[in-house]
Amino acid sequence: MMYPNINPLVLFFASIFTSNILLTNFLGMCSFISISKDLKSSNGLGIAVTLVMTITTALNWILERYVITPMELGYLRYIIYIIVIAAVVQVLEMIIDRVSPNLYMVLGIFLPLITVNCAILGVALFMQLRNYSFIQSVLFGLGSGIGWWLAIVLLAAIRKKTENAPVPAPLKGVGITLITIGIMAMAFIGFAGMINVQ
Amino acid sequence: MSDFKKILKNNFWLENPVIVQILGICSTLAVTNNLRNTLIMTIGVTLVTALSNFTISAMRNLIPRKVRMITQVLVISFYVIMVDIVLRAYVPDVSKALGPYVGLIITNCIIMGRAEAFAQGNRPLISFWDGFTAGLGYMFVLVVVAFFRELLGFGTVLGIQVLPASFPKWTIMVMPPSAFFVLASFIWIAREMQIKKDISKTSQPSGGEKK
């Protein structure tokens, strides 16, 4: 097993800023656009995504290393990953409901949505494709989650400010949001001189 | 037959999944800097949407409501794996360039959306058509976006040089941010046209229904 020689910490910061899963890989876009109207929901979804992403990346890495690779089940990879993600979301929903009804109220509707959030599956697939070690994978998952969270909270804040801006009618809503995201993406890519992964 | 025509019109233009419903832009914006990859990717998405809609519709009376989401995801994954294997066998370079994005068709919200909104309550054949046309609507938007990004970014179309070599290449067009700008411009133009049509329709209600 050859792992790429990247310091896990570098990977962590890179996945938050320069290779932000949302702004450079376009993953998790649907919920990003539809939820970011409201700062509070954005925050809730951000926490949930970070949590699920870290856990599923770790679990999928273990499965990849000890089940999929030795048993040559590569062709079932997508199904295995998606089942793990669905299961984790389900279990997490039950645990959060029990332990902290408050958090459950905040996350409630957003948790099931996460199963079909492409960012979660995307991180797992990137992790497998780039052959990361366990520590690298977990930090990559955590960093990508935080990056996603940061981006959605920032966008929600910007959208709040520009809500009443005089924008041409056909561009209102999604159009102007996409342009805002584009400008954000440029700003995030601006960090690229500092750290870079792939 | 008019049902089929109406679905085509709705899915392709009036309620285009990308322009109006903003679905499924997640995984595919990344591949629109190259027209060839985009074409292959969107053909894959169209096939998966159509076939999984057909399958889910055929099984709709057998699936308990509680496990319907996971069943849908499994059906979709099955077709995505087929697409992945075919791509790997016949166009390995494209498969490599698309990377994880082929697998991410599973979580493409258009497919889930059509399955939930249409296949769950309609007969298989018409569901197939609904999925197919939704895929075409998606393909239409992405191909236009990819055309402009590749043309301005590399000066090529489908890898063939069209613009003169003296044309300064807009490097930003092949970088991630421009995907948002081009798509936003597209949505702007499309909505402008849709709004204009609405206005002309309401001002002369007698002639509005034709075609």
Image: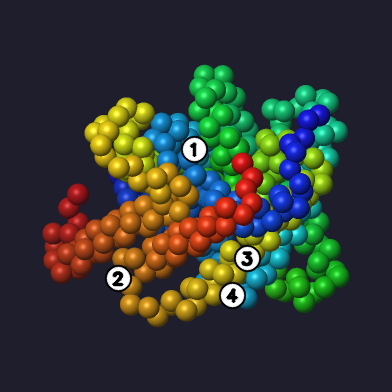
At label 4, counting other C-alpha atoms closer than 10 Å, the crowd grade (few under 14, some 14-19, many 20 or more) is some
Quadrant of the snapshot with the N terminus of chain B: top left
Which residue does the numbered mark 4 point to in the structure image? A39
Residue name at image x 33 percent, y 42 percent: B169
Q: Which label's residue is closer to the chain start, 4 or 2?
A: 4
Type of amino acid at the residue the image marks with label 3: Leu
Disc number at residue A150?
A: 3
Residue B206 position in % (x across, y down): 14, 63
Residue B151 position in % (x across, y down): 32, 39
Q: Nearer the viewer, mark 1 or mark 4?
A: 4
Query: Disc 2 on helix, strand or loop?
Result: loop
Which residue does the numbered mark 1 point to in the structure image? B45
Q: Which label's residue is closer to the chain start, 4 or 3?
A: 4
Disc number at residue A168?
A: 2
Chain on which label 4 sits: A
Residue name at image x 27 percent, y 33 percent: B165
Q: Are marks 1 and 2 on the same chain?
A: no
Q: Which label's residue is closer to the chain start, 2 or 3?
A: 3
- Tell me how far mark 1 sits from mark 2, CA to CA: 32 Å
Give the vertical position of A149 relative to A19 (above or below): below
Type of amino acid at the residue the image marks with label 4: Leu
- Position of B174 with respect to A70 (left or right) is left
